[in-house]
Amino acid sequence: MRTLLSTLSVLFAVYSYLVYTGAPERGTVASAEVRTGMRVWQENNCAGCHQLYGLGGYMGPDLTNTYSLKGEAGIRTFVRYGTGRMPAHALTDPDLDALVAFLTWVDRSGQSAVPAEAVHWTGTYLIEPR
Ligand code: HEC
């Protein structure tokens, strides 16, 4: 009986230690650079045209997984030079680095299931496929 109790006490202590000191899931803690990138995202009103996790403006595509789709170089090129439809953004190098870090973090933290073909140019969702 005593052995059982002490075994259980030790197990309880080990379990408590693991629960209270366990590292949070990888990729969920935002570094200072990621937080700076979020500020850059907000100050430049990227969300006016883009969604993250499906929320935001609908002139441009959802960028939740843009890091996986376009890569770091793709993000830098779109932001720096723009396209015929997206304006170029003259960001400082550290701000652009932070923005890439933010979008990389967002990419790890969620998945967007909104395919570009499902969004009409007026911003409405198409329930029936075109
Ligand atoms: C005025 C609207 C507008 C704003 C503001 C804007 N974008 Fe865009 N963005 C677009 C449009 C439209 C596209 C699609 C461009 C194309 O294919 O020609 C796009 C494309 C992109 C792409 C490529 C995504 C893909 O899969 O094709 C990235 C990355 C991107 N934008 C990042 C940003 C970031 C970061 C900001 C803020 C600094 C931003 N955009 C601000 C309209 C905008």
Image (cartoon, grey):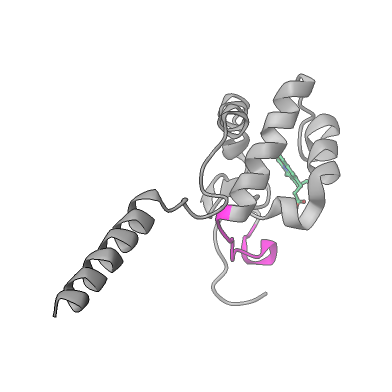
> Looking at the image, which residue is at 56% across and 27% down?
39
Q: Is residue 84 visible?
A: no
Q: Is residue 9 above or below residue 25?
A: below
Looking at the magenta stretch, what is its main secondary structure?
Answer: loop
Q: Nearer the viewer, residue 93 or 45?
A: 93
- Residue ranking furthest to the bottom: 1
Q: Nearer the viewer, residue 81 or 117?
A: 81
Q: Position of residue 120 (x, y in %)?
A: 63, 59
Based on the displayed image, in which of its 4 quarters is residue 65 positioned?
bottom right
Which quadrant is home to the C terminus? Answer: bottom right
Residue 117 belongs to magenta span: yes
Please report the bounds of the magenta region as a residue range. 109-120
Quick one: 42 or 49, which is closer to the camera?
Answer: 42
**Coordinates of residue 84 in the picture (x, y in percent):** 84, 39
Where is residue 42? Give x, y as percent.
56, 29
Q: In the rendered image of this protein, does residue 42 appear above or below residue 13?
A: above
